[in-house]
Image (cartoon, rainbow, N blue to C red):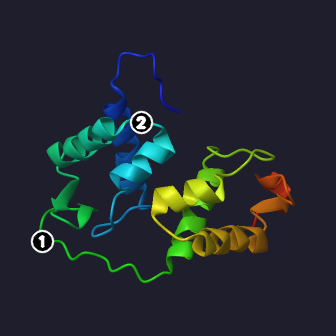
Amino acid sequence: MLDRDGPVPLYIQVAEIIEERIASGELTPGDAVPSEAAMEEEFEIARTTARNVARELRRRRLVHTVQGEGTFVGPPGVPLRKRSRAIYVRIADEIARRIRRGELRPHGAIPSEESLMRRHGVAKVTARKAVARLRERGWVITVPHRGTYVSAREKWPVD
């Protein structure tokens, strides 16, 4: 959780979270770090704050930016990982990670299709496939005409 009222600037707090993801191996050399739009959505921060996060991570020499491509873990020249998984799988995996980390709590709503479409720049069918994948694996349940909610912890898959 971000401390929005504390003395540490938000961009530093978010940079530390991403640094933890790198240290834990969740993000490895060549992986793309979350885009500015993804950071805005995930951490509910302004675009300028997201830019400052990338700047801070570069200052710490944890990432490098490739013009027009994005920001990647590791120093310049590290081979960039090609995204081999389908985008709907990556979206579903990201939501599952947020559930595991407690950012999305049992019985709470997950981001809407519209939110997923905006955040990831995908079509409605792709957002729906991501939600269907989460549902098939037991991460979420969908209540018709109401929304999709995080399943009770005992229903979560054991990975």
Q: Residue at x 77, y 60 (%)?
A: 140
Instruction: Say which amino acid is labelled 2.
Output: Ile
First along the sequence among labels 2 and 1: 2
In percent of width and height, residue 95 lies at 60, 58
Q: Which residue is labeled 2 in the image?
A: 45
State the image coordinates of residue 52 (x, y, percent, origin top left).
25, 38
Q: Nearer the viewer, residue 25 or 69?
A: 69
Which residue: 18% across, 58% down? 64
Front residue of 42/13: it is 42
Which amino acid type is marked by label 1? Answer: Gly
Task: Measure how far apart labels 2 and 1 are at the Cα level.
Answer: 30 Å
Disc 2 secondary structure class: loop
Which label lies toward us, 2 or 1? 2
Is disc 1 placed on a helix, strand or loop? Answer: loop
Residue position for label 1: 77
| Left or right: residue 18 compared with residue 98 | left
Q: Quadrant of the C terminus?
A: bottom right
